[in-house]
Amino acid sequence: MAREYLKKATLTSTSDASDVHDIVQGILSDIEAGGDAAALDYAKRFDKYEGSILLSEAEIEAAIAQVPERLKADIRFSHDNVRRFAEAQKGTVSDFETEIVPGLIAGQKAIPVNAAGCYIPGGRYSHIASAIMTVTTAKVAGCRNIIACSPPRPGMGIAPAIVYAAHLCGADRILAMGGVQGVAAMTFGLFGLPKANILVGPGNQFVAEAKRILFGRVGIDMIAGPTDSLILADKTADPFIVATDLVSQAEHGYNSPVWLVTDNRALAEKVMELVPGLIEDLPEMNRDNARAAWRDYAEVILCADREEMAACSDEYAPEHLTVQAEDLDWWLNRLTCYGSLFLGEETTVSYGDKASGTNHVLPTSGAASYTGGLSVHKYMKIVTWQRATREGAKPVAEATARISRLEGMEGHARAADVRLAKYFPDEEFDLTANG
């Protein structure tokens, strides 16, 4: 049967996209020209904050002292899990060398970037977990300079728990500045900071646009849109848990899509019955987001069988993908497009968002069809090298000269010619393009 939409989205994540490019470009240009003073002016305007921009050790310690011990323990637990997973990821990349042909050795090196700028949202929500996800991976990767940047609250500064998490995870400097001005400060090396080689971490549309504009001058992890989540569920799934998981992700934002894909009509209808009540039971701030996200962006899709469900999921390429169905190994082997996969009722996206160890900085808006999420690899340059004996270089030089001439690149050919002439003066070579 064709897919049946029991609930169809009326809007998409780009429906309300506004043109923020000119605004962001103007701010970046002002700050690049005006330096520290311009960044401070924007901080006063947007952050409404005039306190310390770079936190001192004393200020860090004072913030840490405000964090309850139980919360510190939870943050340490999350940090340990993220660190262990990142260390295992790093172990999958190694330096190596191999003999391509006799006498020609080529190799690979994984070199961490020097400076990482980690943006940690801190406006409506204090994104403690984003500090853990971004700073920990940079530290494990081996970055020598890690800057944690988070918006301060008027009269308060950065949330103490964010300060504690960033410090615990290895941030070298903590910058109390939000939005475009914070991104600019890390990129341009303001306030005595090293210029960031890569910018990572989630943010609002202005932060995302700043990263888009600056990409090329610096690396970025990805350009993030509204978070999205998809659940694949069959007749064995618990409708209450499915509904709860959908609502838990809808609270991210009014335009955060959540999707249920199933081959069981009864399950779908029960979930649709349960969701509104679960939303209304949330606190007001969360309720407003979830209500709008469910009303305007959510979809419930009925498929013929699990193969059609998997194909549907791969087309959506969700940021978060949950499977609550039989035969989890089949799904693990079949599914190909997702940012992070959660197999079985015993896992949930919330675990990955906060404490289980996998990273929560993930591709959105279908980008999971071509890229994965933040990892130690994003902070590392995989570079190559080579060396050769004169005999080993001989056949390479001959091939290079002839290919270059066929392409019309005589300068390249002569770089090979001179070596053959120097190393093998008594030999003759046919180095013409059509020899």
Image: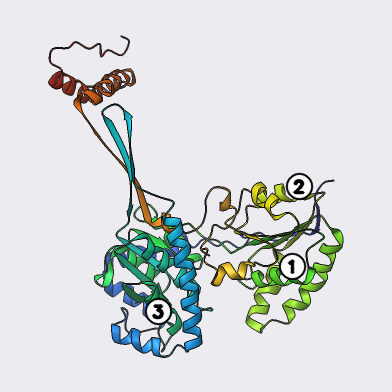
Ranked by sequence position, the earlier of labels 3 and 1 is 3
* Residues marked 2 and 3 touching at CB (< 8 Å): no
Residue receiving disc 1 = 242
Cα–Cα span, label 2 and label 1:
19 Å
Ranked by sequence position, the earlier of labels 2 and 1 is 1
Dot 3: within a 10 Å radius of its alpha carbon, few (fewer than 14), some, or many (20 or more) residues?
few
Dot 1: within a 10 Å radius of its alpha carbon, few (fewer than 14), some, or many (20 or more) residues?
many
Eyeballing the image, is 48 above or below 185?
below
Query: In the picture provided, is 97 more to the left or to the right than 93?
Result: left
Residue receiving disc 3 = 45
Q: Secondary structure at mark 3?
A: helix
Query: In the picture provided, is 226 more to the left or to the right than 202?
Result: right
Q: Toward the viewer: 394 or 402? A: 394
User: Which residue is pictured at 54% across the width and 57% down the height?
Assistant: 363
Q: Which mark is residue 308?
A: 2
Dot 2 amino acid type: Glu
Q: Position of residue 239 (x, y in %)?
A: 79, 68
Ranked by sequence position, the earlier of labels 2 and 3 is 3
Cα–Cα span, label 2 and label 3:
51 Å
